[in-house]
Amino acid sequence: MRWLIILFVSFLTGCSYTPVVDLRASKNEAQLFQRDLMECKELAKQVDFTIFPTYRKAVNNCIEGRGHSVLNQW
């Protein structure tokens, strides 16, 4: 029962995660940030959506790979 609650909470909080990005440092890619973020969130769901830190890392890695400067990594 406890694991079910943890999975449910991680599902709810995982969908709302948005990395803090310095768009000035992203230069020309800044205009594509919203599209890149949406695509990276969908890709991150395919990695392993049951573990919240893995989802955040996947989104951050994807955003960085597309040339954006992510500030809130942990």
Image: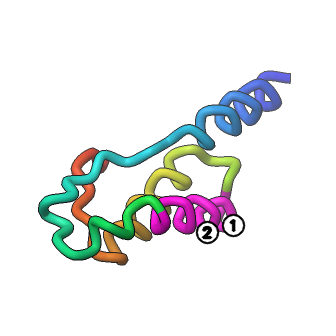
Quarter of the N terminus within the rendering: top right
The residue lying at 44 percent from left, 59 percent from top is: 34
* Circle on res. 46: 1
Percent across and percent down for residue 36 are 46, 68
Q: Amino acid at mark 1?
A: Gln
Magenta part of the chain: 35-48
Q: Identify the residue at the far front of this view.
A: 31
Q: Residue at x 68, y 53 (%)?
A: 49
Q: Residue at x 49, y 66 (%)?
A: 35
Q: Secondary structure at mark 2?
A: helix
Q: Residue at x 50, y 42 (%)?
A: 17
Residue 33 falls within the magenta-colored stretch: no
What's the mark number on residue 43? 2
Decide: is 45 above or below 7: below
Q: Residues within 10 Å of mark 2 (few under 14, many from 20)?
A: some
Q: Is residue 13 left or right of residue 72?
A: right
Q: Are marks 1 and 2 in contact (CB under 8 Å)?
A: yes
Magenta segment's dominant SS is helix
Give, as a three-letter code, the residue at label 2: Leu
Asked if residue 46 is among those painted magenta in the image, a careful observer would answer yes
Rendering coords of residue 13 (x, y %):
60, 33
Q: Please tell me which residue lies in front, 54 or 40.
A: 40
